[in-house]
Image (tube, rainbow, N blue to C red):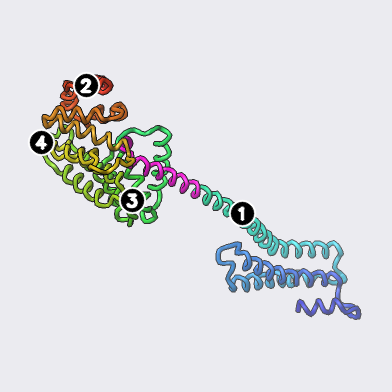
Amino acid sequence: MIFHLCIEQAIPESPAVDPWIGITCFLTVTGILGGLASGLVQKRYGTIPGSGKLGDLAIDAFVGLVAANSIHLAFAGVLNYSTPKDTKLVVSLISIGLVAGFSGPKVLQALARRLENTFLKDRIEKAEKRVASVEKDARGARDVAFKMVEGMMVNPLAPDRKTEPWVKDVIDVAAKAVLEEKEDRRSAGDWLMTAFKALQDGDYAEAVARSEQALRASPGPELTWKIYNILGLSHHFRQPEGWKKGDDLDWFSKARDNYDLALRHARTPDEKQLVKANQAFVYYDAEEYGKAAVLAQEIVQQPAGKPRRMVNQPVLDLARIVGAASLIESGDEPEAVKMLNQVRSLDDFDYLFKEKDIQPRTIAKLNEARGLEDRHAITIQRLYS
């Protein structure tokens, strides 16, 4: 009926049709098209939950059709030649309002949502780029921190000595980033770095746990000996305060076994010497002075007929100190003095004395020993007092 009226309006010979009915017909068709357009827009951009479904499109079209026909059925009867122009205008405006009220908000909502989605997509893309940049920077910081840790693990002055504040800050930030990741994303190097941090923080149980995680993460040969060395140090430092010969040796057994594994996996002479120096210390702390002295002498003595190669001098000095301490405890004062005098700078290792890695009773014996060079005698006297 609606389309029939529209066709009649287009035929001039039909005197029974008022031009205002043409407006009603136009609005009716607009209502239908508006419903379809609204449905299509919602289907394309998904303005409400489920609006992308074909059923919603059909419903929108149907509602638009009903609204437009309701306009016509309600007002077509009054739209004739006898109807005042004001009434016709009011009817037309009401029709326009109903059609616009139905279709307009939906179309505008869809367009607004489309603009919002475009804006959010741009924001998300920028955020993802920033996250990628931060992750790259974090990975870079971790790489820098790991290089620091690697260098410190082969430096006998570093493992149990407080680092410079800025170095500690870099390691702390990198370790925190590692620990915030899921465990299955952490590499053996990541675990080793966090184990080293725990070791320096004095949390030896956590250092052991993280080192064991590093072993489970399939480390390469360049890391394996370092992991076992950290495990040895961690168990070594768990020696109970006030331990004396005859007490439980669990800490010693685990430290010794891990040092043995570190020595087995060490690849270079320097690596092997450092592990041996640590072994000598654990035997000294267990009051196995003879074994400690033998290990120290193996490190510092040069086989006959072979030239001295360039070695890690601090490792040699570390061995000389623990060797001298073991010899003086064994009652061999001359050899103890001879070995200690070979240390280049005893002041570099004062932490060994201050933190009781070298026992106070041993320092007292060294302080009474005759034949120490003045520079070492002064240092020993200062540490003893």
- In front: mark 4 or mark 2? 2
Q: Which residue is mark 2?
A: 384
Q: Quadrant of residue 77?
A: bottom right
Secondary element under disc 1, as helix, strand or loop, is helix
- 2 or 382, nearer to the observer: 382
Distance from Cα at disc 2 to Cα at disc 3: 38 Å
**Which quadrant is home to the C terminus?**
top left
Distance from Cα at disc 2 to Cα at disc 1: 68 Å
- Tell me if label 2 and label 1 are in contact, CB under 8 Å: no
Percent position (x, y) of residue 99?
A: 72, 65
Distance from Cα at disc 4 to Cα at disc 3: 34 Å
Residue lying farthest to the right in this orientation: 13
Q: Which residue is mark 3?
A: 223
Mark number for residue 170? none
Distance from Cα at disc 1 to Cα at disc 3: 43 Å
Specify the segment rendered in magenta. Answer: 135-158
- In front: mark 1 or mark 3? 3
- In front: mark 1 or mark 4? 4
Mark number for residue 122? 1
Percent position (x, y) of residue 338?
A: 20, 29
Neighbourhood count class around disc 1 (C-alpha, 10 Å): few under 14, some 14–19, many 20 upward: few
Q: How many marks?
A: 4
Q: Earlier in the sequence, mark 2 or mark 1?
A: 1
Q: Which residue is mark 4?
A: 245
Q: Amino acid at mark 2?
A: Tyr
Taking the image as drawn, is residue 277 in sight? no
